Image (spheres, helix red, strand yellow):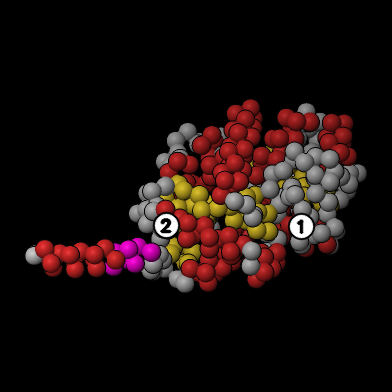
Amino acid sequence: MGSLMRSLVLPAMLTLASLSHAAFPEKPIEMVVPFPSGGGGDLSARIIAVGLAERLGQPVRVSNASGAGGVIGMSKVATATPDGYMLSYAAVDAFAVNPFVFKKLPYQYKDFKLIGLASRTGLLLLVDPALPVNNLAQFIAYAKANPGKLVWGSAGTALSSHQALEYLKQKDQIDILHVPFSGGAAAVNDFLGKRVSVIANTPSSSAQFVKTGQMRPLGITLPVRSPVLPEVPTFAEQGRADFDFDVKYAILAPAATPRDAVLRLQKALSEALSSATVVEQLKKIDYIPFVATVDEGEQVIRDETIKKRTLVETSGMKLD
């Protein structure tokens, strides 16, 4: 190639490459949800995916890769081509809890790049209406006066509903029997059947039973009241801001994803979470946007990891 031709062709090639690079995204994006379809986490992912798609100009397709406590889905994204076209919509516990409850974990937080925190939902502390308690302080006092009498049903070992129990057992020195179930629905069924007397469950899954008087809510683990049950006070309002076991979700990409793709995704997520449509749709399933800067999100994950690691190690929660 002659010098004149090179002087014309090479700049043109560089310009085309630059334009192509700046065009992210140029094809649909897959967002992997590491838990089954149909639950609140899955529904919130799909709501936010629509918001992202509107701002990115490409479809954001949600796929479910459940199993092994979220490990299968997280591993899929950790080992994906780092080009911005595969993301994870994961509970923060995937990093704050899983490394300490699994003996071997095929991913680490360093394998991912945080796009941002996305959403959160609270846990209601629910008791049998026959119990003479109406708030957290009365519940703790009753548990202390009746050691071993209460039975707490959780959605599963080491999940948020179990973590909340272990925290109260350690913090408030109470004796409550723990029964893990294979999900929140199973725990609700046994609660309604009077086989367990206490559960911690999401408002969207419990509101109908609260409204019919079959469950008595003592509070919610969110910084604000539930959109579905606004009459239920937060634990912070009861002087127990430390009891904050709400379920937090984040969107992440493989660690080596190009910076321009990461920034584009971060901008789209920030805009989506500020959308009135997204806020309203999340509210209907009792989720709220988790609006935070990326730096604030990193700090939340660090804080959660420190707190949960201590809880896991002192309680002996293990999954394998």
Element carrying mark 2: helix
Residue annotated with mark 2 = 260
Mark 1 surroundings within 10 Å by alpha-carbon count, few (fewer than 14), some (14 through 19), many (20 or more) = many
- Closer mark to the observer between disc 1 and disc 2: 2
Element carrying mark 1: loop
Disc sitting over residue 196 in the figure: none
Q: Amino acid at mark 1?
A: Ser
Look at the image and tell me whether residue 86 can be seen. Answer: no
- Residue lying at 68% horizontally and 54% vertically, measured from the top left: 121
Residue 165 at x, y percent in the picture: 71, 38
Drawn side of residue 207 relative to residue 248, left or right: right
Residue annotated with mark 1 = 226
Q: Amino acid at mark 2?
A: Asp
Of residues 183 and 281, the one nearer the viewer is: 281
- Residue lying at 74% horizontally and 40% vertically, measured from the top left: 243
Give the magenta-colored segment's residue range. Answer: 16-22
Q: Residue furthest front?
A: 4
* Magenta-colored stretch includes residue 222: no
Residue 304 at x, y percent in the picture: 62, 39
Q: How many marks?
A: 2
